[in-house]
Image (tube, rainbow, N blue to C red):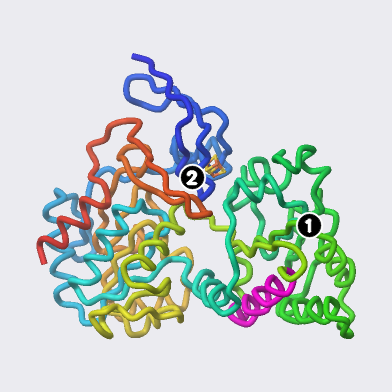
Amino acid sequence: MEARIESAICPGCACLCDDIDITVVDDRIYQAANICLWGASKFLAHKRFHPKKERRRLQQPRIKQGCLWQTVPYEAALKRTAEILTRASRPVIYGLTNSGSWAQEAALDLARSTRARLEPADLAFKAPYYRSLMKHGLFWASLDVIRDEADTVVFWGANPLHSCPRHVVRYSVFARGKFTERGLEERRLAAVDVYRTELAEFVKLFIRLEPGQEPALVQGLLAALTGGKPPAIRGLRRLAALLEEASYGVIFFGRGVSYGPAQELLDGLGELTARLNRGSPFIFFPLTADFNSTGLYHLLLRELGSPLAPDFGHDLAGTGQAEPVAWSEVDAVVVVGADLFWFLSQEEIDRLKKRQVPVVALSPFANRTTGHAEVVIPVALAGVETPEIAYRMDGLPLFLPKIVSTHLWSDSRVLRELTALL
Ligand code: SF4
């Protein structure tokens, strides 16, 4: 039987595009239209940007017995996970930026009941941002307002073509808004990065920096805007002029900013945005790739009053920690909605393995973490095989209905049943 679903929401990235048309045949997704290759990789289970390479789905829970894998029912995998968490004195629940809001709530409850630390996968990127936001008292705008009003757009350490591909078409570059009717022609665009990216093909000004030079550029821009003497950095004066001429501006920054001294850079960018705000509205906006990273920080703010990583091992109030966890202290990890081993250095992976730190991975797809985990628990795809809530990158909450059926449990169910066992 064939069914067509119009205006479905794509859980591929934090744009959560809501104009996807899906064709379902016999309870399987047969076709997806209006979607980018990144999003299609979720609906059609192929590798990101490689539609001919299949992305392997996990079908059954498995646990490691000695060197051998054993396929087990969910209940046995949960029992083993509960034993691991009960034995641990410094457990960490990691990831959750690619999980729906119900799973995030369940993970927070699990962290509380096991006195664990809950570590968002993008803490190194978001914690300095929230601190800068609070320090400089910056305001916020939705993507729709940015599409309608922004005539000056800067991408800093961000490449939307890789992290959220349709962002440029729907909101920031080519999109036609109420006061930007001619799209690209109405916008002055700049990008700052340590690599030359595809953005260089269409932005008016592309500044390529040496690694570590970014804080100097920010201070130079502040100096140029306040009549001081900026350092000699190629493109600095042109960027300062572009920012000054804005009638409504936005600085989108990406994960690239967390590869250097993130707090110093984001403090500087926050100060620059505050300075620009004296002339015209300017927004400082994280270009979040993971589809529900924003939902996780909303949950932490709502429940605990802080967007930092709650650590229930320190106190039951879950005091927020801005610094990423020291993996040398950790003695058990539950990974949900992230691929931890993709981000860790080889030395950190080797040290975790040497100390035989048990890793439990909940994931719809096979990845590096599931390859190293002691317990692997497959879960349904949120927003495709199980309903969920997710927050668009600007904080708009959306309900993602189920599109097709699966025998797999949702990650929120796995986490709730696990908490009930403890
Ligand atoms: S931009 Fe993001 S939400 Fe939109 S179709 Fe692509 S992956 Fe999906």
The residue type indicated by label 2 comes to: Gly
Q: Find residue 69 and report its horizontal and vertical position in percent.
A: 23, 56
Q: Earlier in the sequence, mark 1 or mark 2?
A: 2
Report whether 410 appears left or right of 23: left
Report whether 136 appears left or right of 325: right
Q: Nearer the viewer, residue 398 or 59?
A: 398
Q: Find residue 135 and report its horizontal and vertical position in percent.
A: 56, 80
The residue pinned by badge 2 equals: 12
Q: Find residue 33 and report its horizontal and vertical position in percent.
A: 54, 27
Judged from the image, the secondary structure of the residue bearing numbered disc 1 is: loop
Report whether 76 appears left or right of 378: left
Residue 174 is one of the magenta-drawn residues: no
Mark identifier at residue 96: none
Question: At 38% across and 40% down in the image, what residue appears?
Answer: 400
Q: Nearer the viewer, residue 56 or 391?
A: 391
| Res. 112 image quadrant | bottom left
The quarter of the image holding the N terminus is top left
Disc 2 crowd rating (10 Å Cα; few below 14, some 14-19, many 20+) is: many
Q: CA distance from mark 1 to mark 2?
A: 32 Å
The residue pinned by badge 1 equals: 247
Residue at disc 2, CB closer than 8 Å to ligand 1? yes
Residue 272 is one of the magenta-drawn residues: yes
The residue type indicated by label 1 comes to: Ser
Q: Is residue 198 above or below residue 358?
A: above
Report whether 117 appears left or right of 194: left
| Res. 331 image quadrant | bottom left
Question: At 29% across and 70% down in the image, what residue appears?
Answer: 333
Q: Is residue 10 above or below residue 34?
A: below
Question: Magenta span: helix, strand or loop, mainly?
Answer: helix
Q: Which residues are magenta?
A: 260-276
